Each structure stands twice: as structure tokens, then as C-alpha cells.
Amino acid sequence: MTDTVLSIEDLSVTFDLHQSEVHAVRELNFSLQAGETMAVVGESGSGKSQAFLSIMGLLAKNGRASGRAMLGDLNLVGMDKNRLDQVRGKDIAMIFQDPMTSLNPSLRLKTQLSEVLVKHQGFDKGKAIRHAVEMLERVGIPEPGKRANAYPHELSGGMRQRVMIAMALLCQPKILIADEPTTALDVTVQAQMLDLFKTLTEDFGTALVLITHDLGVVAGVADRMMVMYGGRCVEKGRTDELFYDPRHPYTLGLLHSTPHIAHRAARLDPIQGLPPSLEHLPKGCSFHPRCAFCFDRCLEERPPLAPVEGGREKACFYEGPMTYEAVA
Amino acid sequence: MISYALRRVLSAIPIALIAVTVCFFILRLAPGGPFDGERALPPNVMANLRAYYNLDQSLPMQYLIYVWRLLHGDLGPSMVIDGFRVSDLIRIGFPFTLTMAMSAFVVATAIGIVAGMIAAVNQNKWPDYVLVLVVMIGVVVPNFLSAALLQLVFGVYLKWLPAGGWVNGSLTHLVLPVTVLAWPHAARISRLMRGSMIEVLGTNYVRTARSKGLGERLVLARHAIKPALIPVVSYLGPGLSYLLTGSLVVEQVFGLPGIGKYFITAALNRDYGIVLGTTILYMFIILALNLLVDMLYAWLDPKVRYR
């Protein structure tokens, strides 16, 4: 488990607007080990999706990425599109949030699945379709041979997300990025889907990046997690450590805004205030206006991401005890 | 797919009947008749003529007679030119009109689709701006004006092409009229194609296709063109009817031997037979083409087949 498959160094993503620019992601650093599952957690607008879209070369036209994303010896950031097309879909694949719109409505499933194998493995069409059908079976689609001839609108949302998973895993990629893969699905289907992710990525030795805002999802499957706020990583470490002993007030806030079956709280405690606008991030620590532990230093100076004991990192000046009571 | 096709064909029958009825009665609402000249005809001649063409019967009766003959494939006689029937007109003029309109249609549709795609892929760059300019001219300038301008420039000043007239089998005589006909059609098609292509290129499924590393060319060819064509195809039916009716004017301006010449003369003379026959002929063509478009539509958008 020490093989690094993806190493992100100083990744920043900027969008040009008419008069200004917005920094969606700033100086992100992390590495992904072979076969592990890493969760990336944060509110809407924290930059979690854009960071990974930039690695896949899928930013909107006005977006630019800088820094490095090393997949082996290859730097994916700013890579020529033709070169990138030999990597994405093969070594690094992505699944998107909305399965209802992520499949092409005018093409049969077998076409959409088999083309990946034709492109990356050089299979002929017949062989590619046979493999695609096998993969549909593995992701739990009943009557895969028949379903392969169907169009996306003939399938339910859960089934379509299974097809997306099958499509992403066809070439047994080293890395699978799943951007909120369960958000658009029924709660009952969510659990099945997470099981499926777990089994398949283990079978294929694929490292999984799970982008989500649902901590319930993270707890079940992720080995490590990274918490993002205002385009920056504010805390990262092993999932269990962050859950039982959060060191950043934002992580603490996220945990407390999640319902828990053991604590029969009368009401949930959301984090006060709204996520910041990326165009006008507060001075100092971006989180300080919403932070219960904020002191004068936080208003002026931005805390760097620094190591804490046990290989963890956090970006916060506060060193005292942090309890839920103190927040309330 | 077959049951869908059958349903479409069956639903075209009442539409055709309604169209025939409306055409028949609207034409009779217009003042004047085929035998009103500057000099009134003697009453007995008039009575004979009216009886010959069934004009002495009540209007509903005339309608029934007309529909009965139509069902037997008879589009009726001309009421002004003796012994001339609508079927003669079709035999003489229609092959030419159809050739011209169809070549304009094919050329314009192909150019429009390709130009729209190029503009969409180069959105807000110079190819896009050039296209917008050419399109605006095509949409704004009416065909009788563009016809006259092109005749003047290419026919009279530059003398590259004949300004009008017709020599059998001569393609050069077709260039200007087909251009005049095709331009607005190509302009509308390219505008639709540009818009829908831009929309499709921003969809999640195109992003999925890109994430698979297919390469931009395959993404466009396989994933973007088919869904982007849907609004274009739905315009093809009405677009062709614009072309066919536009060809009437263009034939007149360029002095070409199609149906247009007869149709315009007939309309001025209140020649019920010719006007109605031609209108109904066009109606059938447009209906048939719309059926064809519906089939294309079902192929492009699989969801349509179930409605």
C-alpha cells in the first residue's frame, strides 16, 4: 500500500470571469496510494469537484489549472489533449454526480461501453461488446445481454449509475474518481452502490477518490479523508481519526451537522453562516467568520496546512481543546 | 419502430383531409371568379361554362365532387386554359421545380449543418463571427431582392453566370436561382445547428464521453452530432415548404419553366382548378416530407418511438 499512483502538487484552479478571476482551488497537495479509498469532503463551492475535473482535463473553457498532477511520470495538468486522451478512460476514470444526464440518450448502452475498450485496448467491436456485457453483469445489472441493447432512458437512475461504474472500470483503471456518485440516488440504492464501489475497486486494485458532502458515505468506505474549505485543504488524515478527534473547527462542524443514530438530539446543529464566496474570501483564515474558536490571529493571518502528530495535517491556529459544547 | 411509422402514416390522413377542405373553401372566399374578364361573357355562354365546371351546383356539392375526384387521383382541370389539366401542369412544370427545390434543399441543409458545427466548435472566434454575418444577410434579405442583386452582380456586371432563362440541362443556369433559394434555408439551419451543438457540447454526457478519452473528433462525431441534429431535423419539414413556395417567386424572377410561372398566372386569373390543384400537390409533398422527418426524429431520439 505504499505505491503512490497519483501525486498532486500545488494544484490551483482559476476561472476567468469578465472583470475578475475566481480561485476555485488553491495550492492543493496530496497523494493517493494504490488501492486506497480517499474521501474528499466539503460544502458546495469548496472546490472539491473542480480540483478533480482539472486533473481529467474537463474544466470549463474559462478555467485554467496550474501545479502538477503526477500519474507515474506524466503530469496531467496542462497536458496536450491528444496525449491526455490516451490516459483518461484507461488509467484514470471518472463517474459523475447525475446518472440521469451522464449517459448519451441517443446511443445504445453497448455502444457507449464498448467504445472505451475499442479505443484503449484495441479490441474489435464484437469482443468489446462481449466484455461490456460481462462488466454489466459484474455491476449487478439483470439480463445484461438484453440491457446492453437498451437506451439509457429505459433504465432507472440506480441502474444508470451502475452502467456508469461499469463503463469507468472497463479498462481496470489505477484511479477512479467518483464525484458525488450517490447524491442523486435513493437512500436504499446508495448503500448498494457504495458496496459495489468497495467490492469492485478491491477486485481491480483501483484507488478510489470519493468526492462527497455526505459524511455517512465517507465513514463506511474511506481509508483517508481530506476536508476542503474555500478551495483549500483544511484538514486531512485517516478517516477514523478525523471522525473521533477532529482538529479543525470546520471538520468538527461538519460532523455535528450530521444526524447520528446514537445521539437522539432534538435538532441538528448546522455550521452557522454560509459558505464564502470564492471571489471575496475573508482575510486571514477563510473560515474565521463562522468559527467558534476564532481569535485575533485568525483575522489577519492565514493558517498554513501543517502536520499534526500521526501523519495528520490541519490548517488552524487554535491548539486548545475542541468540544461540541464549546461550539454551542 | 414499425408501429410508430404506421401510427404516423394513419394520423396524416385526417390532416390531409382537413387541409384539402380548408384550401377549397378559402379559395372560394376570394372575390372574383375564373370567368370575370374586362368584357362580360354572354349569359348563356357563362351558364354553359359554369355548368361544365360544376360551378352551378351548391358549394358543399362542388366540394364533394372535388374530393371524390381527388380520391381517384384527379386533381381537376384548369378553368382558364382549355383542355389543360393540373396533371398536365405537373407533368410539364413539376420535374423542374422539384429538381431546383430539392438541389437547393440538399445543398443548403448540408452547408447549414456543417457551418453550424464549425461555428459551435469555434464559438466566439472568427469563424463564428463570419457565419453570424452571412446568416444574418440570408435571413434578413428577401429572396426577390437577393435574386435581383445576384443577377446584377454576377449576371450583368461580372458576366460569370447567366442572369436568367433556361437552357435544357445547363447547370450554370441553375447556380444563381439555387443560391437564392438555398441561402436563407442554410442560414436558418446553421443557426439552429450552432445553438443546439453548443448546448450539446455543454451537456454531462459529452463530458462523460471526453472523460473516456475518446478524442475530440469521436466525441463530436458519435456523441454530439446525433442529439444536436434533433432541432435541425424538426425544422426540415417547414424549411422545405419555405423552399417550395419560395421557388415559385424565384422561378418567376429568373424566368424558369417550373410550376411557379403557371401558379402565379393562375392565382391572378382566379383559376380555381390550377390554384387548388397546385396547393394540394404541395400539401401532399409537405405532408410526406414531414412524415419522413418524423421517422428521422425517431431514429435520432429513441424516446420519441414510445409516444
Image (cartoon, helix red, strand yellow):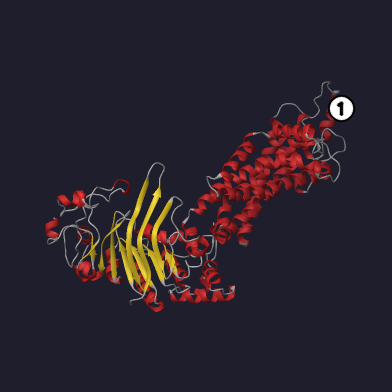
A153 or B144: nearer the viewer? B144
How many numbered badges does the structure rendering display?
1
Q: Position of residue A287 (x, y in %)?
A: 23, 53
B43 left or right, relative to B275:
right
Q: Quadrant of the N terminus of chain B?
A: bottom right
B32 left or right, relative to A276:
right
Vertical side of B246 occupied by A246: above or below: below
Q: Residue at x 59, y 51 (%)?
A: B117
Q: Position of residue A102 (x, y in %)?
A: 46, 60
Residue B56 visible in image: no
Q: Position of residue B123 (x, y in %)?
A: 53, 47
Vertical side of A15 occupied by A228: above or below: below
- Looking at the image, the residue that sits furthest to the top is B39
Badge 1: chain ID: B
Q: Quadrant of the C terminus of chain B?
A: bottom right
Q: Secondary structure at mark 1?
A: helix
B97 or B91: nearer the viewer? B97
Q: Residue at x 83, y 21 (%)?
A: B40
Q: Amino acid at mark 1?
A: Val
- Looking at the image, the residue that sits furthest to the bottom is A203
Vertical side of B58 occupied by A117: above or below: below
A309 left or right, relative to B220:
left
Q: Quadrant of residue B276?
A: top right
Instruction: Please give the residue where the numbered disc 1 appears in the rendered image.
Output: B45
Residue B198 visible in image: yes
B140 or B123: nearer the viewer? B123
B111 or A293: nearer the viewer? A293
Vertical side of B69 occupied by A32: above or below: below
